[in-house]
Image (spheres, rainbow, N blue to C red):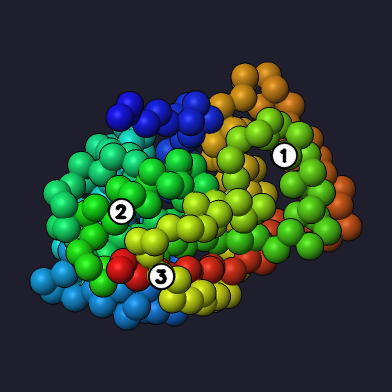
C-alpha cells in the first residue's frame, strides 16, 4: 500500500502558521472536554491517541484525565510546537491512514478539526486496527455560526480561494462511515463555544486557515486587507475593538465493534 500524502494546503498552510493557529483558533469548553473524557472512559491505565493533533489544542486538555495520551501529527512545524508545550504527551510523526501504533494498542481515538483531511475509508481501517474491541472514536469540530451576517460576508471572501480544498462545512467527511462495518455510531453532542478576538487576532485566525496560509504572499495580503476593510465598515463590526465569534463544539462518537 502506498504511503498517504498530506494535502499540499495542509502541509504548506499549517507549517507556515503554527503559532497563529495555536494563538487564535478556538479551544474547547470544559463541558465538552468533560463529556469527551466520560464518553471515552479516560482515566489512569487507559491509552488515547489524538490523531492529527496539530499544535495540541485538544491534546493538552486530555492529559488531566490521567490517561496516557499519544499525539500523532504529520506536519513537522505543528508537531514541534506540540512537543514543546506538552511534556506529558508522547508525540509521534504519522498519518491517520498509517498510524505508527501497534495493533489493538489504544482504548480511544480523538480527531479534532481534521477528519475532512483524511482518506476516510483508509483512516477508519487504520483506526480499527489500533483500537481495542469496544474502543471509542470521537470526532470533534468547532463550527462557526455561518448565518451571522458579518461572518457570512467574511466567508464569502475566503471561499473564493478554497479551490476544492477539503473542509468540514459540507459534512462530506461523515460519508466515510457509510458501509463501514468496524464502527457503530453512538451519538452526537453539542456545546456552546463562543470566542472573543481582537480584529488583529481574527485576521490571524483567517491566516491560519490551511489554504489561506498556502496562498502566494501578494494574494494572501490582498485577501486579508479586504477582510480588514469589511470588518471596519460592516454595521455589525464597525468600530468594535473585539469581535465575538458565535460557534459551538460538536462531538460525534462511534464504538469499535
User: Looking at the rendered structure, which numbered label has been put on residue 127?
Assistant: 2
Residue 179 position, x and y percent, is 48, 58
Residue drawn 37% across the image and 73% down it: 36
In this rendering, position of residue 223 left or right of residue 39: right
User: Looking at the rendered structure, which numbered label has been put on residue 109?
Assistant: none
How far is mark 3 from mark 1, CA to CA?
Answer: 36 Å
Badge 2 marks a residue whose secondary structure is: helix
Badge 3 marks a residue whose secondary structure is: strand
How far is mark 3 from mark 2, CA to CA?
Answer: 13 Å
Residue 213 position, x and y percent, is 56, 31
In the rendered image of this protein, does residue 215 appear above or below residue 85? above
Q: Earlier in the sequence, mark 3 or mark 2?
A: 2
Closest to the observer: 146 or 101? 101
CB atoms of marks 3 and 1 within 8 Å: no
In the rendered image of this protein, does residue 164 appear above or below residue 60? above
- Comparing labels 1 and 2, the label whose residue is closer to the camera: 2
User: Which corner quadrant holds the C terminus?
Assistant: bottom left
Q: Is residue 235 visible?
A: yes
Residue topped by disc 3:
184
Q: Mark 2 packing: few (<14 Cα in 10 Å), some, or many (20+)?
A: many
Amino acid at each position: 500500500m502506498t504511503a498517504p500524502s498530506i494535502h499540499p494546503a495542509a502541509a504548506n498552510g499549517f507549517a507556515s502558521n503554527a503559532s497563529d493557529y495555536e494563538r487564535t483558533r478556538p479551544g474547547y469548553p470544559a463541558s465538552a472536554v468533560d463529556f469527551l473524557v466520560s464518553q471515552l472512559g479516560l482515566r489512569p491505565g487507559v491509552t488515547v491517541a489524538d490523531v492529527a493533533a496539530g499544535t495540541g489544542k485538544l491534546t493538552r486538555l486530555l492529559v488531566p484525565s490521567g490517561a496516557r495520551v499519544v499525539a500523532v501529527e504529520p506536519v513537522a512545524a505543528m508537531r514541534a510546537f506540540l512537543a514543546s508545550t506538552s511534556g506529558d504527551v508522547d508525540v509521534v510523526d504519522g498519518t491517520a491512514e498509517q498510524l505508527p501504533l501497534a495493533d489493538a494498542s489504544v482504548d480511544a481515538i480523538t480527531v479534532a478539526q481534521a477528519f475532512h483531511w483524511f482518506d476516510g475509508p483508509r483512516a477508519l481501517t487504520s483506526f480499527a486496527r489500533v483500537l481495542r474491541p469496544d474502543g471509542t472514536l470521537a470526532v470533534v469540530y468547532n463550527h462557526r455560526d455561518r448565518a451571522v451576517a458579518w461572518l457570512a460576508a467574511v466567508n464569502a471572501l475566503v471561499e473564493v480561494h478554497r479551490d476544492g480544498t477539503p473542509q468540514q462545512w459540507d459534512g462530506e467527511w461523515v460519508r466515510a462511515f457509510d458501509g463501514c462495518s468496524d464502527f457503530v455510531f453512538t451519538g452526537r453532542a453539542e456545546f456552546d463555544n463562543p470566542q472573543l478576538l481582537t480584529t488583529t487576532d481574527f485576521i490571524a485566525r483567517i491566516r491560519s486557515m490551511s489554504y489561506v496560509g498556502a496562498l502566494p504572499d501578494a494574494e494572501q495580503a490582498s485577501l486579508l486587507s479586504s477582510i480588514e476593510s469589511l470588518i471596519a465598515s460592516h454595521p455589525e463590526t464597525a468600530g468594535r475593538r473585539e469581535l465575538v465569534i458565535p460557534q459551538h463544539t460538536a462531538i460525534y462518537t462511534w464504538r469499535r465493534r
